[in-house]
Amino acid sequence: METSSEKFDRVVLIDRSNSETCDLKYLKFLCDRTGVPPNKLLQRYSQDKPKGLIAEKIIPCLRGERKTLREDYYDFVLAGWLDAAGLDRKELENLVGEKDAISVKQEAPKAQDKKVNLLNADGALTEALFEEKIMTRLLDDDGLPTDTLCELRELKEKTMIGALKLLKGREDVPEGLSYTTIQNWLGGRTKCVESHYVEFVREAWQTYPEVGTVWLLNENGTPSDILCELRNLKKKTDISPRGLLRRCENVPEGLSESILRRWLSGSIDKAKGTHVDFVRNAYLNHINEKQEKIEKYKELSVDQDSYLDAFVGNIILVTPEIRDRLISGFEKTGQSSFSLLKTSEDDVPTGLTARGIRAWLKGDMLYAPEEHLNFVLKELDGILEGKPRKDQQYRFFDMKKHLREDV
């Protein structure tokens, strides 16, 4: 309940001649444009809502049953609808002014011409607006998408171009049209809109080529065959999204590490076909390169009794026996590749890294410099023989404990 009306300034909605004021026209126009009823509007902006404001105080105003409204109530609902419509006050005044001009404009005398009225007696948009193609419906009377809205959604899906990118950099965007306005259309939050806006957006999307869309999730939310294939390729290669894209040249625009991670996690339901093909080929190329190295290894026919017999110049072939010896040495010593190098009393050969050692152990790197491999084997043998290390805190390596001790 409002307390005494004298405490609040009030906005006049119906004047003494029983005519609607501009303030009421603004509210009706925005309500019809956005398709957001008062109750939904107040729910959307409930945190800042003035005390005592409820939808039942706004609805009679739209029907013309109340002649005034508290100024703070009026300012709040007007600001909310402006935000939902993506307009500012000046744009609103211009749009309502144009429609008022249309409603009273008398055309050249022709028998078939009719005056176009914007609002009927109930304050709703008249059919004449749609017949004259001044306004276009996006939702029907039941709140379902019209053919126009379905067409716009389909254009967005086919081109994979969002509303922000669609308008970005264009100088011919009609006044009052913004990317948030288009997003409201596509989200089913706008009931009807000016026809020239729709034509502009439709033509803008039609300038982009259609991009094949690949579905990563089925309708029931389960992974599609394509997503399962990508996950299997990642598991087979054991390459992270970051590692995969860093290996590649000419990564398509719009494809990033975060996007690829969201594919694999199932948080994105569709992707560009060109992006999916690029990622699939990148994984397959890595598998093929690795297979070529394996085939080359099989053709060498080296004596595997000793790694010394596998010398090829100053490069040593990491045979299965050498790899088993390395794995056994690390298991027996309790060392990691990082701790082995960190605690060595000798100078670590240039270019030898913990990451390179891990590649030998995993079989990703089939060849190694002789100096590097001999150094690692010597260090492992020395630990087993009790040779002192530089820093015993790395003996049994725990990265989390190490980080805590460094803090």
Image: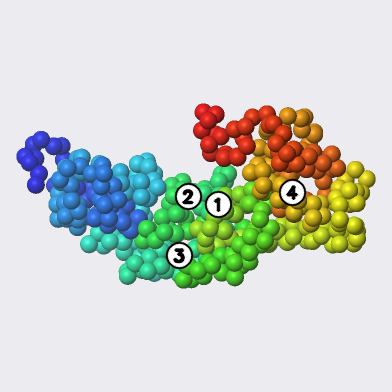
Circle 3 SS class = helix
- Amino acid type at mark 2: Tyr
Q: Are marks 2 and 4 in contact (CB under 8 Å)?
A: no
Colouring scheme applied when the structure was drawn: rainbow
Task: Report the residue at 79% width, 57% height from top.
Answer: 320
2 vs 4, front mark: 4
Q: Are marks 2 and 3 in contact (CB under 8 Å)?
A: no
Task: Report the residue at 53% width, 58% height from top.
Answer: 265
- Amino acid type at mark 1: Leu
**Residue under label 4:** 326
Quarter assignment of residue 348: top right
User: What is the x, y in percent for residue 246?
Assistant: 69, 47
* Label 2 or label 4, whichever comes before in sequence order: 2
The dot on residue 166 is: 1
171, above or below 103, in the image: above
Comparing 277 with 163, the one in front is 277
* Label 3 or label 1, whichever comes before in sequence order: 3
Comparing 1 with 365, the one in front is 365
**Residue under label 3:** 149
**Residue under label 2:** 179
